[in-house]
Image (cartoon, grey):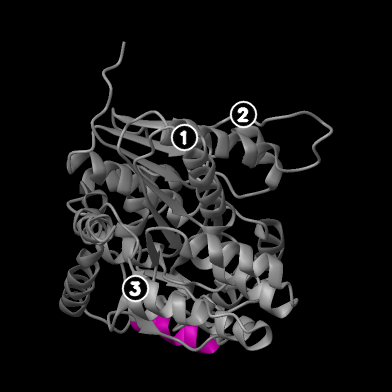
Amino acid sequence: MNARPDRRLVIVVRADPVICGHSGEARNLAEAALARGFDEVRILTWPLDRLEETGLPLKPLDTVMPYSAGIHVERPDPVGGYKIPDGRYLAGLTGRLIELFTDGVPTVCMSLYLSPHTIAVADAVRAAEATGLPVNVTTVAEAVGSDVTDVVRACVEEGRFGAAAHVLTSYLSQDVCVAVSEYTKEVIVAAAEEIDAINGTTFADECRLRIEISYPAIDTSAYLDIEAADTDRLLAKRGLTRDGYVLFLSRLGTAKGVEDLIDGFAASMAGHSQTLVIAGRGPDAATLQRYAESSTAADRIVFLDDVGDEEKPHLMAACSAYALPSKPRPEFTETFGIALVEEMLAGGGPVITTTTGGIPEAVGDTALIVPVDDPAAIAGAIDTAVLGMNRAARVAHRARARAYALQFDRGPVFDRLFEKVALAVAAR
């Protein structure tokens, strides 16, 4: 029989195998928690069959790296039958949270994504306290990109006050409210101001006061001191050579600027001797593959849809340039840019990106910046990265980028976040 834990961390998130930077962030926070003395970490997420039904981009299951001992991934079954048209899975998740909150173990519960995860946590806390059983839980809610674009902003644009109020009150009911970037906070506050102006509420002032910044936690060790022999072996399997390809590795969606990258690559001088590797899965994968087939550089463009956690750092470390020309779209705006930081840590070619959303916070002054929707500028940046920098310049650039990226290491990020948790507990 397992011993009762002294201290538990629960993380509610769309976890692996979902292709999402915050899925990786949850893993990193869980690993950091074990290193900082938590003796039990539980990641609560969704059943695999439900994830497949949603159409979310998923990694092949055999490429997902195992979690450390002490981290338990739970996928609560849905509650109810066919007569319940929706909410069955949310009921299962909320019910499991109530069980964890009422078993007497001091618990910190962190939710990534306000909808539906923070909503589920807020509901579970209310229900747990109503049972009359002892409850010792501290809650942390982290607002990420799609919270702003898919939920809060959409509520404002569609005049759906009730839905907006549900999200924001659930968020503000948590003990600690954080956002993944200053940009994310600014957009939430701006949306709250519009809601307040129409309805006479005070959400904006509360958001300004309560929301703090907690940048995503990244496992920097996975990208440092990469074994060159392992990299060469993995590249050989892919038919690639070190510094012989421009890399895009992210979710395949319109907002990521892949079409602009394809056009820019085709127009570049360097592209004649390079391969463009587009790695990832996503809703626009088929459309982007057709677009690439029509490009004048079609024979030099490769799509990879099976890159796993182990291979990713090696692909990043050996590329001649890493391009993510993200653009603001109604359905998604980059509110940080975790993949950009991972590339900077891996020490591959220079990052080529835009100033969309929170990207400037992720890259500082270490990237080659191009305007949004500008393939010609992308072509120029590729030529600069591949042809315009000698070895000494590339080494210096990599060192500067890595030094900036190290601030996002999961250990210090975890410590700064839990300083906020300690203050919240002391203030009760």
**Of labels 2 and 1, the one closer to you:** 1
Give, as a single range, the part of the protein colored magenta: 376-384
Compared to residue 307, the image places residue 182 above or below, namely below
Q: Which residue is mark 3?
A: 362
Residue at 64% across, 38% down:
91
Q: Which residue is mark 1?
A: 132
Q: Earlier in the sequence, mark 3 or mark 1?
A: 1
Q: Which residue is mark 2?
A: 77
**Of labels 3 and 1, the one closer to you:** 1
Q: Main secondary structure of the magenta part?
A: helix
Within 10 Å of disc 3 (Cα), the crowding (few <14, some 14-19, many 20+) is: many
Gap between marks 3 and 2, in whole Å? 37 Å
Front residue of 76 and 427: 427
Within 10 Å of disc 2 (Cα), the crowding (few <14, some 14-19, many 20+) is: some
Q: Earlier in the sequence, mark 3 or mark 2?
A: 2
Compared to residue 50, the image places residue 385 above or below, namely below
In the rendered view, does 131 fall on the left or right side of 78?
A: left
Report if residue 275 lies within the magenta region. Answer: no
Front residue of 354 and 176: 176
Q: Residue furthest top?
A: 1
Q: Could you tell me residue 119's position as x and y percent?
A: 56, 53
Q: Could you tell me residue 216's position as x and y percent?
A: 35, 61
Mark 2 and 1 residues: CB-CB less than 8 Å, in contact? Answer: no
Compared to residue 294, the image places residue 190 above or below, namely below
Residue type pointed to by label 2? Asp
Mark 3 and 2 residues: CB-CB less than 8 Å, in contact? Answer: no
Q: Could you tell me residue 200's position as x and y percent?
A: 63, 84
Residue type pointed to by label 3? Ala
Classify mark 3: helix, strand or loop. helix
